[in-house]
Amino acid sequence: MNPLVNHQVWLPIFFLAIIQTSNAAEVADHVFLNGKIVTVDKEETVATAMAVAAGKILYVGDVASARAYRGESTRVFDLGGKTVLPGLIDSHTHPVSAAMIEFDHELPEMQSIADVLAYIRDRAEVLGEGKWIVIQQVFITRLEEKRYPTRDELDSAAPNNPVVFRTGPDASLNSQALTHFNIGIESKDPEGSKIERDSVGNPTGILRGWSRIVNIPDAASSSPQQADRLARLQTLFRDYNATGITGIIDRNTSTEGMGLYHGLESSKELNVRVAMSRAVGNKESAERIREQIRAIGQEPAKATPTAMLRTVGIKMFLDGGMLTGSAYLRKPWGTSKVYGISDPDYRGLRFIPNDKLEAAVDECAATGLQFTAHSVGDGAVHALLDTYARVAKQRPIKHTRPNITHCNFMSAEAIRLMAKLGVSADIQPAWLYLDTRTLAQHFGEDRLTFFQLLKDIFKEGVIAGGGSDHMQKIGSLRSINPYHPFLGMWITITRRAHGYEGQLHPEQALDRMQALRFYTINNAYLMFLEDQVGSIEVGKFADFIVLDRDYLTCPVDAIRRIQVNDTWLAGRQVYARTATDR
Ligand SMILES: [Zn+2]
């Protein structure tokens, strides 16, 4: 909506140079007329005009009343009937590492074992003998073959390099890497980990909970400076703005990452509101974990949070992943070629025993921090809920908005318990889209009845917010995971998945308004900012986006292709699609 752009080309929003003196008590900086403003307030009001002053919404309602806020310096925009939504929020990203992953070299898209091996051969040639080759987060559930590359395959691609194919908490290693780490037939499984073996006990190369067994070195061939990190983070945030994102929660912020955010905030270059779940490791003692949590409670981002940058709490990892065969389930996984599981009683991995988990939750409640843990399997979800219930008997925790991250496999009782304890969740529809075909093949559709129970969660009044778990690359659809929020909304509305016929349990589909709340006001709640952002209401920050089509009435399959024309953050335009893009 740049008024300077030649509107003949792209229409229909242009600067109206009509200036009149305001009759209202207050004068707006900007007035927006003739739109379809989906406010996402409690009544789900749709307005036609709004006025903005000093970065906040001064008025929302009809055109005639909005005009009254015009003053001599007011810029008036004609929205030309376009749909306006509140700025979108992604409640689960890892921007700092995602922005850096391709600093060294561009990563090709890998859809098959052959792609993976071709990439390894390429790297072996570029790097030379003996150098580490580490592939991260190429999920086996998303490969055509739906399995790990074997030790032999990795050996054949790079016989003279140690190779690690790492995905979540699990990894597949080649022979050089196993030798480097001294992993052989005699090796024991450290607590919370498992070395997969063949019928005679030799390691197959697959390690579950690899971080407890090996220390994978950094394989980058050039090392970025602080300025590089800041520049790439800004590039990513500009792309977030271009997809309509005005707020995120970084769900595992390191101290270094927090430093980058503070840097951008103090130079006034932070274009996305950032809430942080600070990273706390799970390997240290309960007392050491308590100390870390107390220290996080003293940091400026917690002690003096702003609407742009704030610590909401901490995050730990309670179990493994469903894309890698290590989510902690209540019933056994079942043996599987895809996941390389041979033990019929195997239920996945749980990384935090009860005493430590309770200490962490208790300390968060005492410090006023939100606790959340990566909890993919229903075993982990229930273990965490039981811990919240135990701590809640000792001291109040509701006000800290205890949370469950991922929360993929659930149960009806879990949702009831969440409602009772005031527990929220951050859930990632992209996983339903990308992984259903493999999950359905492994678990069968019945066992997926309890997968991402969004409709039930909304019905029970539990607050859940949508996110991407964006962890790699810049680019809303090429990234892992894709962070295009309208793709996310479309997934929750259709429950359709890549390479999968039909809908996955459509009874759990959201309607369009629910899907919108999932990416706006609910996520604002998860950021502890629902009084300031997440809807277009008087007194809130003017964070909003203008769309290329009508989210509420366009054909359902057009939702995933919605593009954002303009993004505004606190009354400032931070993104405008150029005429040639439209
Ligand atoms: Zn994550």
Image (cartoon, helix red, strand yellow):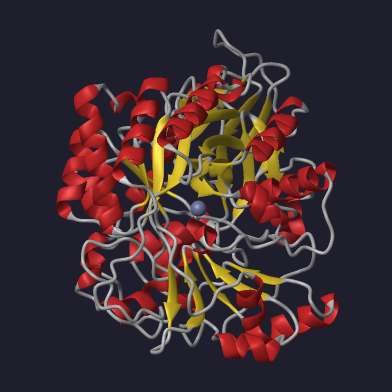
**Quarter containing the N terminus:** top right
Residue at horizontal 57 percent and vertical 69 percent from the top = 166
Give above or below for 291 relative to 127: above
Q: Is residue 219 visible?
A: yes
- Position of 400 compared to 173: left or right? left
Q: How many marks?
A: 0
Confirm whether residue 556 shows in the render: no
- Displayed quadrant of residue 450: bottom left
Residue 66 appears at what percent x and percent y?
53, 24
Residue 502 image position (x, y, % from top left): 31, 78
Residue at horizontal 67%, vertical 80%?
Answer: 176
Q: Residue at coordinates 53% horizontally, 27% vertically from top-left? A: 296
Q: Quadrant of the C terminus?
A: bottom right
Please identify the residue farthest to the top as the structure is shown: 25
Q: Residue at x 70, y 81 (%)?
A: 120
Residue 189 image position (x, y, % from top left): 43, 66
In-front residue for pair 298/558:
298
Viewer-proximal residue among 510 and 208 = 208
Residue 17, image x and y in percent?
Answer: 73, 31
Viewer-proximal residue, 279 or 63?
Answer: 279
Q: Is residue 323 left or right of residue 231?
A: left
Report the front residue among 468 and 348: 348
